[in-house]
């Protein structure tokens, strides 16, 4: 392989094959940088030694596919290239074979960065040749292999589940597949293997896992694609702690495969605490936490500022941003979610003029330095939102959660915008740059990731969320999640107070995984369906086979699914899932390379008993 050759190979006869990365013509000497997935080496075509090879070298251009036959030799001291791992050697060719020519590509894989992403995706086969992309997918392979090995070592069996299955509500739209054999009926592509993995527990397999392909017809964003891969697992007879230990073990192995050590066990906080401290259930702990600053204001202050005294008053700071002009602050306003019943104060100079004591106290409570940008978020009494006030002592109400969420989202968006000023993300970028998977594989030496990656378990989520549009309570996760046993009595009387026996794993502002202890009794499952407004008839129609299975000796069971693409994205230092998925879709859900989706023939539609009627 081109990237494998070193000074110790000097004198050895070799054949190397790959793509011409660059070509330099120095008259009697032509230098070709030859590239394959392992790296680049320099091939020398000397006109006196190989006139035929030199002639071919005059004709080749970047991205031609060639084979070079020759001998490895050491470069002259002044010709050594310290930027290349093969920079001490070159191949003096005795023969050059042109295996295929190439059209002029719209960009060169030799370029470090290509700005136009649409061009990259249209010519993905050229884009994937770039060394950065080659590294990403080699890393993905190593991470996947490490996860498989770690799961197998813990007694898990890898079992595949169907891709064509029944449409069941799991939180997102299904992709539907019409049946040719059964006119008017449809399969669905799995949003996850949820029901099947539970049935595997009923089947006695005890410990299952799968690197599973999943499909969700939802809007795309930087960390979401229509089709994705998750590390899916289920266990019989577990407590939360058992699931956590399994995940921490295989995730540590995955990070080790990337050359990064990840300390365990991971810290745990409740959903309510996460919302209070971070305004999010996927907190980024690299940023300063939010602070309760209600004590900085008197009731009269709040009335003057038109702030709801019954709702949270919190502040957060973005370090080293400095004072912003009105125009700069106005540009930030669209980032604030106005639908949460909250308002914000971002003009601290003006606040300090009207309420100097309060402003000083807020900065003190928030631990803000002079150069920090401080924002206050509070409830807006003029903005009524339809939400629940929980009757459960000590728990956050939906109205309170909305205020915290508005603050947390604003905190995240501002942190992204001003990353070059606060530099909180640079420690992660540095660790990713310096991590060496090959070194870790050979010697076990890894770079410490404790300051760069911050995993956290979030537990005790609300069981239900209120859907304003329908006026009904809907499952916050999925309807097979078990509630906390002592909250069961409130299922119908006060759904907002019911906590779920579920958990998420968050890291650096991303939700890596979500799971729960499942309902393993049919009577409890029926109560949950009833509390969601699902009739017995509807439950039978949608989940009849699963309800039947619950009656045949179902063990207590639980599990989790982690996004493999997101894990790789973090460890590759990529800003978007598209950098670690070989053939992704655009934000408009289009495959630019294959030109999909597209129409199909009338004959195909006829065989599927379908007719398209577009809205005018």
Image: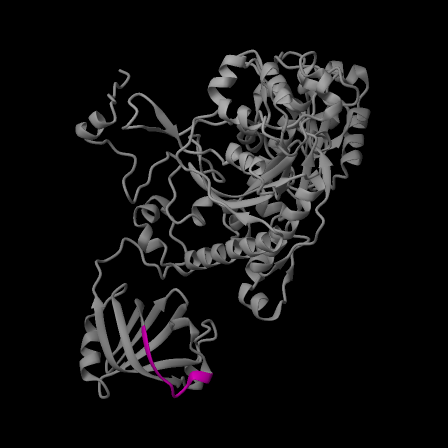
Asked whether 448 or 360 is in front, the reply is: 448
Q: Is residue 105 left or right of residue 159?
A: left
Q: Quadrant of the N terminus?
A: bottom left
Q: Is residue 593 left or right of residue 215?
A: left
List x then y, in percent, for residue 247.
63, 47
Q: Is residue 327 left or right of residue 283?
A: left
Asked whether 326 or 91 is in front, the reply is: 91
Magenta residues (range): 8-16
List x then y, in percent, for residue 171.
51, 26
Magenta segment includes 266: no
Q: Quadrant of the C terminus?
A: top left
Q: Quadrant of residue 312?
A: top right
Asked whether 1 or 553 is in front, the reply is: 553
Asked whether residue 282 is in view, the answer is: no
List x then y, in percent, for residue 383.
62, 13
List x then y, in percent, for residue 251.
61, 51
């Amino acid at each position: 392989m081109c990237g494998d050759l070193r000074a110790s190979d000097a004198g050895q006869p070799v054949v190397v094959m790959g793509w011409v990365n660059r070509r330099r013509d120095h008259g009697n000497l032509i230098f070709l940088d030859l590239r394959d997935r392992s790296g680049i080496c320099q091939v020398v075509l000397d006109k006196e030694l190989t006139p035929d090879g030199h002639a071919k070298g005059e004709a080749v251009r970047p991205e031609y596919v060639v084979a070079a036959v020759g001998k490895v030799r050491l470069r002259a001291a002044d010709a050594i290239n310290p930027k290349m791992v093969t920079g001490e050697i070159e191949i003096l060719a005795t023969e050059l074979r042109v295996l295929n020519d190439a059209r002029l590509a719209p960009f060169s894989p030799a370029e470090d960065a290509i700005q136009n992403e649409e061009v990259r995706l249209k010519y993905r086969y050229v884009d994937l040749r770039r060394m950065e992309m080659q590294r990403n997918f080699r890393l993905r392979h190593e991470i996947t292999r490490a996860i498989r090995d770690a799961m197998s070592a813990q007694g898990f069996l890898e079992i595949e589940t169907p891709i064509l299955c029944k449409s069941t509500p799991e939180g997102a739209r299904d992709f539907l597949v019409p049946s040719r054999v059964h006119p008017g009926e449809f399969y669905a592509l799995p949003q996850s293997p949820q029901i099947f993995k539970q049935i595997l527990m009923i089947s006695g397999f005890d410990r299952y896992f799968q690197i599973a392909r999943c499909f969700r017809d939802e809007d795309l964003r930087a960390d979401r694609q229509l089709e994705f891969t998750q590390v899916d697992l289920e266990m019989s007879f577990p407590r939360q702690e058992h699931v956590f230990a399994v995940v921490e073990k295989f995730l540590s192995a995955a990070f080790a495969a990337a050359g990064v050590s990840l300390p365990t066990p991971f810290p745990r906080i409740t959903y309510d605490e996460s919302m209070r401290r971070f305004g999010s259930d996927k907190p980024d702990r690299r940023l300063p936490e939010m602070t309760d600053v209600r004590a900085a204001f008197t009731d009269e202050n709040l009335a003057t500022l038109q702030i709801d005294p019954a709702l949270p008053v919190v502040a957060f700071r973005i370090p080293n941003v400095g004072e912003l002009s009105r125009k700069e602050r106005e540009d930030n306003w669209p980032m604030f979610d106005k639908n949460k019943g909250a308002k914000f104060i971002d003009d601290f100079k003006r606040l300090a003029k009207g309420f100097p004591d309060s402003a000083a106290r807020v900065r003190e409570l928030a631990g803000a330095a002079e150069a920090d940008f401080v924002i206050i978020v509070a409830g807006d009494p003029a903005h009524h939102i339809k939400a629940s006030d929980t009757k459960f002592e000590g728990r956050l109400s939906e109205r309170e959660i909305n205020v915290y969420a508005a603050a947390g989202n604003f905190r995240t968006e501002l942190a992204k915008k001003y990353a070059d000023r606060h530099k909180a993300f640079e420690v992660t970028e540095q660790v990713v740059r310096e991590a060496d998977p090959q070194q870790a594989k050979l010697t076990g030496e890894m770079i410490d990731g404790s300051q760069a990656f911050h995993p956290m378990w979030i537990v005790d989520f609300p069981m239900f969320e209120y859907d304003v549009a329908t006026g009904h309570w809907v499952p916050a996760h999925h309807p097979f999640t078990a509630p906390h046993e002592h909250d069961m009595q409130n299922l119908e009387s006060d759904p907002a107070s019911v906590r779920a026996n579920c958990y998420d794993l968050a890291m650096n502002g991303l939700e890596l995984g979500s799971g729960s202890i499942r309902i393993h009794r049919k009577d409890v499952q029926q109560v949950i369906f009833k509390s969601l407004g699902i009739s017995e008839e509807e439950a039978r129609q949608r989940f009849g086979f699963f309800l039947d299975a619950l009656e045949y000796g179902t063990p207590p069971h639980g599990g989790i699914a982690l996004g493999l693409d997101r894990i790789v994205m973090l460890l590759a230092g990529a800003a978007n899932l598209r950098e670690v998925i070989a053939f992704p879709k655009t934000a408009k859900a289009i495959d630019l390379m294959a030109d999909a989706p597209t129409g199909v023939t009338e004959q195909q539609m006829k065989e599927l008993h379908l007719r398209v009627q577009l809205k005018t």
